[in-house]
Image: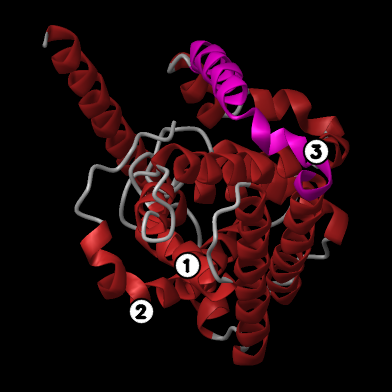
Amino acid sequence: MQNINQKKGKIRTKKILRWIGTIITLLMFVYLIQAQDWSTIWITISKFSLNIMLIVWILFASRILVNSVRWFILLNIANIGIPFIECLKLFLLGLFVSNFLPSTIGGDGIRYLALLRFEDDKAKALSSIIIDRLVNVFAMILLLPISLIVFFNNIIQILDMSMIGVVTISGLKNKFYDWLDISKTWIKKNEFWFKSPDKIFASLMVSWIAQVSYFYGIWLIARYLGMDIGYFQIIGITVLTYLITLLPISVNGYGVREISITSLYSLLGYPIEAAISLAIVSRLIYLSTTLIGAVWLPEYLSYLDKKVPELR
């Protein structure tokens, strides 16, 4: 009983710290905005071309569609029978819920519970969510050399960023080793995933295809904001931003993503007002694509009254 109470206490502490991290980083971003020429930022955003926004929305939505194909491929490896349209609905549902809940009990957890409508094996259903996340993370890590090339002359500055300092102080090193041990245990229990390397590789390729449309959407926004920036640089910045927002210090990356974007673009010499505008516009467009998932929330409510698993 004492161990159970201690475990619940640790989970509760993690949730509290994550919300604190979200609030702190959002306040940092608000402070950063206030220190800039807000009138210029607002004029830039308000005059944003609707045509460009529509194109970017389609590109972001395409990323979601392609990523759901990745999960569908992985579900086939596990022989989880689910029509693709249902797979897409669950994927969108998870993204929608992620906007409001911490990632450990948010989108991925809700996606797992909704999947139980099609799969009775809870362990297999849960592992399909985990492998989907791992493939996506691995796909982004493989693009990290591009980030290192883009920021070759700024490595020391990146390491000195206050956000990285906060993460280091929070004991990320120990957390990494915990994740490593958990991963080894999970791989041993789920070796069947790796008996279809062709499908795993296909899912990896699909992840890259999905990112291409997302990178291009970000590039269009940046160019419209007057940044003379190359597609290669967009990849480098976006990959680093993604990996930083994976750190469990905020809810859905709120605040962390915006601070990271403004800091990284500024390091490359781009106007901070343009970087802030990019962070706001891209966040709003992305959120609007995830709102589609709300359509299927009522349909799956009966499956969401169960305990959501801890995925990190």
Q: Quadrant of the N terminus?
A: top left
> Does residue 64 show up magenta in the picture?
no
Residue 295's disc number = 2
- In this view, the residue in front, 297 or 149, is 297
**Callout 2 secondary element:** helix
Would you place residue 255 above or below residue 5 in this image? below
Q: Residue at x 66, y 46 (%)?
A: 136
Residue type pointed to by label 2: Val
Per the image, the residue denoted by label 3 is 142
- In this view, the residue in front, 113 or 241, is 113
Residue type pointed to by label 3: Leu
How far apart are the alpha carbons under marks 3 and 1? Answer: 25 Å
Q: How many marks?
A: 3
Q: Quadrant of the C terminus?
A: top left
Which comes before the other along the chain, label 2 or label 1? 1
How far apart are the alpha carbons under marks 2 and 1? Answer: 9 Å
- Whether residue 21 is visible, yes or no, is yes
- In this view, the residue in front, 279 or 101, is 101
- In this view, the residue in front, 119 or 105, is 119
Would you place residue 237 above or below residue 300 in this image? above
Left or right of residue 302: residue 233: right
Which comes before the other along the chain, label 3 or label 1? 1
Residue 92's disc number = 1
User: Decide: marks 2, 1 in contact (CB < 8 A)?
Assistant: yes
Query: Which residue, as the protein is rendered here, is positioned at the far left?
Result: 1
Magenta segment, which residues?
Answer: 172-200
How far apart are the alpha carbons under marks 2 and 3? Answer: 35 Å
Left or right of residue 97: residue 72: right
